[in-house]
Image (cartoon, helix red, strand yellow):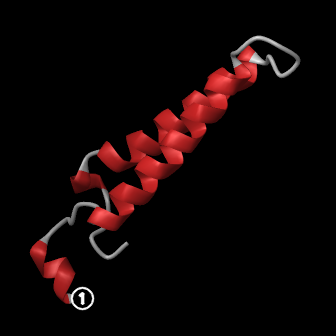
Amino acid sequence: MSAHSDLGPQGPTRMQVCLLATEVMRMAGQARELCGAGPGLDVARAVRTLQKARDLLGDLTSDPEARDADG
């Protein structure tokens, strides 16, 4: 048991938020390219990419009570 366990659930760090924002921006850019015109058109893949980004954001914003403070 760590000292953090005594404090209760902890939110994400500033760096975790920054890294996640960078990854979501990258994924959004990729989805934007995939749904444009031309030979790279793949709307289904663009949607899957955005769904993955949504899942990543959902993990960050999920109920902190459900997460282990040590993890």
> Which of the image's four quarters has the N terminus?
bottom left
Does residue 18 lie above or below 63 as drawn? Answer: below
Where is residue 30, by image quadrant? top right
Give the amino acid type for the residue marked by disc 1 in the picture.
Ser
Residue where numbered disc 1 is placed: 2
Does residue 27 lie above or below 66 as drawn? Answer: above
Left or right of residue 32: residue 62: left
Residue 69: percent from left, percent from top: 27, 70
Residue 8: percent from left, percent from top: 14, 69
* In-front residue for pair 70/28: 28
* In-front residue for pair 56/67: 56
Tag 1 secondary structure: loop
- Residue that appears at 69% across and 16% down: 35
Q: In the current view of this chain or complex, which residue is farthest to the right?
A: 39
Where is residue 48, by image quadrant? top right
> Which of the image's four quarters has the C terminus?
bottom left
Q: In the current view of this chain or complex, which residue is farthest to the front?
A: 38
